Image (cartoon, grey):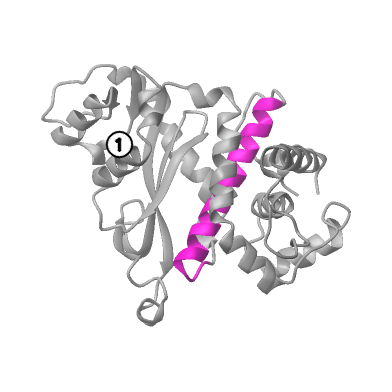
């Protein structure tokens, strides 16, 4: 394990333990605390272990000094699935603790989270009622699973995120995310939201304007050039680069979840790992905040 990852996990443990370490338990407290569980999940994502069994074998061999107690795979899986509210709370805790949280420019996009390919898998999957078929334009094919909707700053710091059926309208999902936490936009006057062509709709832009949000997207051929169109060129690739961090470096497409709770926990684990890396890089003054190279093997 690299020195940088060791430092990140230490700082993350102290941060979580100071903020939420006083959680009370009914009965006997677990041997693996919530703070240790979150740090263990972050280390797993940053080191690229998609198999929980392989990860726990590695942790017992190399991380025993940091984690005195490590559960077996069923126990770790159960704790991780039930820790979704805790992981979401830590994501927000770390995001608020950076200057990026006050950024008045947001980037919105969605990316497929595939949960199965074969027809028998789809039929017997416990994801029925949650997942569905959607179209992946980058690969020119359909997929079965969910879509991850992410609103983040240009640095990649997540503001809010959600998983939804790919059949749902992207604009409706984004509006629902903003309705769930209206204070996010209300606290940032003059907010600029950058999105792609798929978010084009008059009603959608009208709804954003009522919230004090200006939408910046590529203009269509039958439209006049939109205001601030020149700003898209240096920023547009940031949308894909954030998704590439989740897919290429954090193995989002190899999440291994078989139930909605499992998929949600594993997606949240990867969003948390990216958030923790950005948070730590920002606090230590690194010039490139979203680079995960320093935390790799």
- The secondary structure that most of the magenta stretch takes on is helix
Which residue is at 51% across, 51% downward?
A: 247
Return the residue nearer the eye: 175 or 295. 175
Q: Position of residue 156 (x, y in %)?
A: 51, 34
Name the quadrant containing residue 22. Answer: top right
Return the residue nearer the eye: 96 or 269. 96
Circle 1 packing at 10 Å, graded few (<14), some (14-19), many (20+), is some
Return the residue nearer the eye: 224 or 267. 267
Q: Position of residue 171 (x, y in %)?
A: 25, 42
Residue at the right extreme, as displayed: 65
Query: Is residue 232 visible to us here?
Result: no
Q: Position of residue 108 (x, y in %)?
A: 37, 37
| Side (left or right) of 243 relative to 221 | right
Magenta highlight on residue 297: no
Residue at the front extreme, as displayed: 26
Residue at label 1?
196
Residue 128 in the image: above or below residue 224: below
Which residue is at 71% across, 65% downward?
A: 27
Residue 241 in the image: above or below residue 73: above
Query: Is residue 184 visible to us here?
Result: yes
Name the quadrant containing residue 183. Answer: top left
Which residue is at 24% across, 38% downward?
A: 199
Q: Tell me where the magenta segment starts and ends, as one range.
A: 257-283
Q: Position of residue 154 (x, y in %)?
A: 47, 28
Return the residue nearer the eye: 204 or 1. 204
| Side (left or right) of 232 relative to 221 | right
Which residue is at 37% across, 76% downward?
A: 122
């Amino acid at each position: 394990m690299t020195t940088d990852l060791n430092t990140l996990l230490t700082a993350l443990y102290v941060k979580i333990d100071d903020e939420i370490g006083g959680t009370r338990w009914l009965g006997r407290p677990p041997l693996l605390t919530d703070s240790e569980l979150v740090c263990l999940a972050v280390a797993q994502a940053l080191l690229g272990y998609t198999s929980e069994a392989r990860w726990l074998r590695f942790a017992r061999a190399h991380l025993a000094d940091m984690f005195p107690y490590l559960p077996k795979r069923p126990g770790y899986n159960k704790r991780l699935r039930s820790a979704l509210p805790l992981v979401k709370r830590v994501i927000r805790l770390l995001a608020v603790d950076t200057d990026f949280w006050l950024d008045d420019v947001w980037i919105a996009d969605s990316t497929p989270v595939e949960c199965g390919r074969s027809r028998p898998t789809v039929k017997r999957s416990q994801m029925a009622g949650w997942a569905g078929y959607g179209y992946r334009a980058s690969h020119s094919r359909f997929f079965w699973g969910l879509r991850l909707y992410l609103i983040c700053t240009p640095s990649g710091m997540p503001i809010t995120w959600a998983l939804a059926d790919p059949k749902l309208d992207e604009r409706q999902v984004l509006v629902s995310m903003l309705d769930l936490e209206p204070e996010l936009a209300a606290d940032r006057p003059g907010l600029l939201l950058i999105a792609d062509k798929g978010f084009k709709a008059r009603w959608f832009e009208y709804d954003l304007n009522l919230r004090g949000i200006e939408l910046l997207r590529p203009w269509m051929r039958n439209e006049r050039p939109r205001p601030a169109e020149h700003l898209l060129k240096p920023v547009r690739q940031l949308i894909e680069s954030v998704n590439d961090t989740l897919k290429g470096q954090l193995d989002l497409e190899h999440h291994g979840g078989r139930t909605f709770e499992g998929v949600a926990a594993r997606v949240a684990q990867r969003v948390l790992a990216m958030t923790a890396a950005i948070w730590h890089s920002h606090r230590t003054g690194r010039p490139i905040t979203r680079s995960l190279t320093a935390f790799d093997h």
